Every structure is written in C-alpha cells, then in structure tokens.
Image: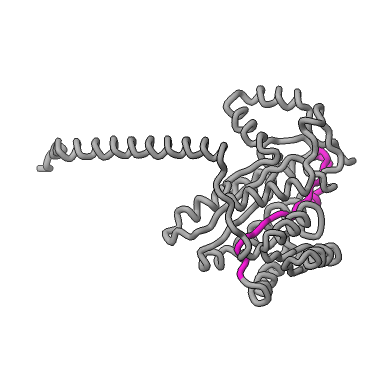
Amino acid sequence: MPQEDQPANPGVQLYNVVLILVDILVFFAKATYNIVMSLVHLVAPPEADDISQDVVLITGAGHGMGKCLSLQYAAFGTTVVCVDINEKTNSETVAEIKQRGGKAFGYVCDVTSRTQIVELVEKIKQQVGVVTILVNNAGIMPTHPLLQQTEQEITKTFQINVMAHFWLIQTLLPDMIQKNRGHIVALSSVAGLVGFKNLVPYCGTKFAVRGIMEALAEEIRSDPRKPNIKFTSIYPYMVDTGLCKRPHTRFPELMKMVKPEDAAAAIIDAQRRGLVEASIPKYLLYLNTFMRNFPLKNGQLLGDFLDTGVNSDL
C-alpha cells in the first residue's frame, strides 16, 4: 500500500518562515538605505573620478557633440580616440586637441560594419592601448512621419543608432572585463523616454539603447567575476548641433535647445560621477519619472501644454 505523506516538521516550517521574514527585513533595510543615499546624492553628488589615465573612444567625433566631447575629455588629460566616417572633420578634431596639448588619435570607421569595428579595435590596442571608456555618440535623426520614411532611412537609423552599439560593446567589453576597469556611455535621448511625432524610428532606436544599457548592466552585475564595469545612459533634450533641423516649443526659454558644449560637459560629469542615468537638462528625467505615475492621458496633456517637438523636414 502507498505510504501516506508525512506531515511537515513544525520546526522546519518555523525555520522557513523565519528565513523569509529575515529576507523581507533585509530587503526593506537595503531599499531604505538606497532611497536615503539617492536623496543624499541629489544634494551632494558622488565624487568625480580621475580619468587622466583612461583611454576614451568617441564615435561621431568629427562634429557636433562628439567633437565637444573629444575636446573636453582631452582637457582632463584623457587619451582620446576619435572615430568618425568623415576623415576630414575627424582629423580636424584630432589636430585641435593636439594644438591644445592633449593626446588624441584619429581613425576612420563605418560603425555600422562589425568587420570594420573589429579591425579598428585591434589597431587601437596595438597603437594606443585598451579602451577603458566608450562613448557611443554617433547617430542620425530623420524627421518626418513614419509613412513617409523610406526603408533605407529606417534601416540606416537602426544600423547607426542601435546596431553600432552592439558591435562596439561586443568588441571592447572583453578587454574591459580583463582589465577590470571600464565605463560604457550611451547617448539615448529624451526621445528614448517619451514618444514624439515625426520621430517614430528615431524614438524606437533611442528606447532600444535604453533597454540595451539596462539589460547589459544587469548581465554584468550577475557575472560571478564581478567586473568593475560601469554604465551611463544619457537623455539629452534637443542639442543645437544641426541634427535637429526644425524644432518647435511653446516655451523657448524653458525648453530651449542645449548648447553642444554644455551637453558634453554634463555627459562627462555624469560619467565621472558614475551616474546610471542623466538627462540634459537634469529635471527632465525626474519629470518623466513623476509623470509615469499618472494616467497616460495626463502625460499627453502635459505634452500638449508644452507643445515641444520637431516639425517634418519634408
């Protein structure tokens, strides 16, 4: 005859309950600590890291925000690796850094080509050293309704704004892990927090970048080797680099375009302080987080009130 199930040992049951209660108490204690430290850091941000011994690779370094980032990183004594598909403008950035007494190397590369990136990184390792900071800055932004976007435009937008991140991270991350030092900075956008008309593919790429960074950070956090790799996602509002050709806003003083020099300074400061996320201006990330607690229509009401975005370029 089959044996009847034996009743659970009351002592074991009590032990399991105590374990769960302890885990709950530890969870709330750690959560409270994290909240307190977050509030403290709002008033007193973490100390900025010394980056003078780092090698930073910046994509799209030949113009706009990439050029500003390159010049400002060099001012901290960082060795700057300027990467751009435009050899002329990239060389100009390198030359300007050297004229100011900085250390810079220039390389031409199509970041949508995984083969070119693999070859590039090997060349950089031999000629410069291991890259310890990656700034994925290169991007494009077609601005017209989705039904008027061509297959070529959409494909190119995802190749530059998303796929290049994969190829660069896959190629550079192993050496960062081996060196036990690395920081990956990704340029998302406010359009990676909120959807905008005339920017459907662009928003898709910037939301993707946000997801890539969050998932990768979790993957590295779970790595048993516990590598010292940091991740920072940046959400700039419209930056005055020429990328955003027809912006509009109801409140130009409140929502004015960001100067590329100011954006670059904010990005470097966020990276040096190890911030996981940062918007430019800072308040936009907090405003988005706050509004997400309310019905979607409230966010739409706020969007209608601010009336900010881009007009179609067609």
Please give left or right for residue 112 compared with residue 175 in the image.
right
Q: Residue at x 86, y 39 (%)?
A: 246
Magenta-highlighted residues: 130-153
Q: Residue at x 62, y 66 (%)?
A: 131
Please give left or right for residue 241 compared with residue 77 in the image.
right
Answer with the quarter of the image where residue 52 lies: bottom right
Please give left or right for residue 89 compared with residue 295 in the image.
right
Q: Residue at x 78, y 62 (%)?
A: 84
Q: Is residue 152 magenta?
A: yes
Where in the figure is residue 202, as x and y percent of width and height? 74, 44
As drawn, 308 above or below 277: above
Please give left or right for residue 48 compared with residue 112 in the image.
left
Answer with the quarter of the image where residue 128 lies: bottom right
Q: Quadrant of the C terminus?
A: top right
As drawn, 150 above or below 57: above
As drawn, 106 above or below 304: below
| Residue 54 appears in the figure | yes
Q: Residue at x 66, y 62 (%)?
A: 56
Where in the figure is residue 138, as x and y percent of width and height? 74, 55
| Extreme-bottom residue of the structure | 126
| Extreme-right residue of the structure | 314
Identify which residue, 152 or 251, lies in the foreground: 251
| Residue 155 appears in the figure | no
Where in the figure is residue 201, as x and y percent of width and height? 74, 44
